[in-house]
Amino acid sequence: MIANEFSEVHVSTVRTRNGMRLRVRDAKAGREILLCPLELECLTWQDSDTFSAMLRTPFGPEEDD
């Protein structure tokens, strides 16, 4: 578990039919994602501006009504 005053996530490894994955689960919202080694590597290519942009719209851009 990794937590601070804003969030709490649980991190574990999972064996799937396609190999090992890293499971990252948001404890409060119940959302989770399984990441393969290549997806994890891609995270290391990003800079902090990329993550800041994702946090501005964490669930995608809002649709116009």
Image (cartoon, helix red, strand yellow):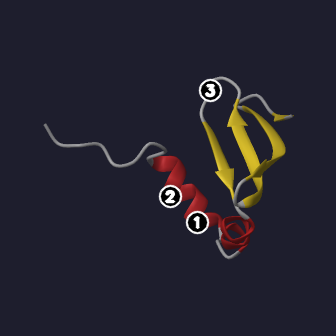
Q: Residues within 10 Å of mark 1 (few under 14, many from 20)?
A: few
Determine whether label 2 and label 3 are within 8 Å by CB: no
Q: Position of residue 46 (x, y in %)?
A: 64, 72
Q: Position of residue 38 (x, y in %)?
A: 69, 71
- Name the residue beneath numbered marker 3: 30
Q: Residues within 10 Å of mark 2 (few under 14, many from 20)?
A: few
The disc, 1 or 3, on the residue closer to the chain's N-terminal end is 3
Nearer to us of marks 2 and 3 is 3
Side (left or right) of 16 relative to 54: right
Identified by mark 3, the residue type is Gly
Count of numbered marks:
3
Identified by mark 1, the residue type is Asp
Nearer to us of marks 1 and 3 is 3
Q: Which mark is residue 49?
A: 1
Please tell me whether mark 2 sits on a helix, a strand or a loop.
Answer: helix
Determine whether label 2 and label 1 are within 8 Å by CB: yes
Q: Residue furthest top?
A: 28
Identified by mark 2, the residue type is Ala
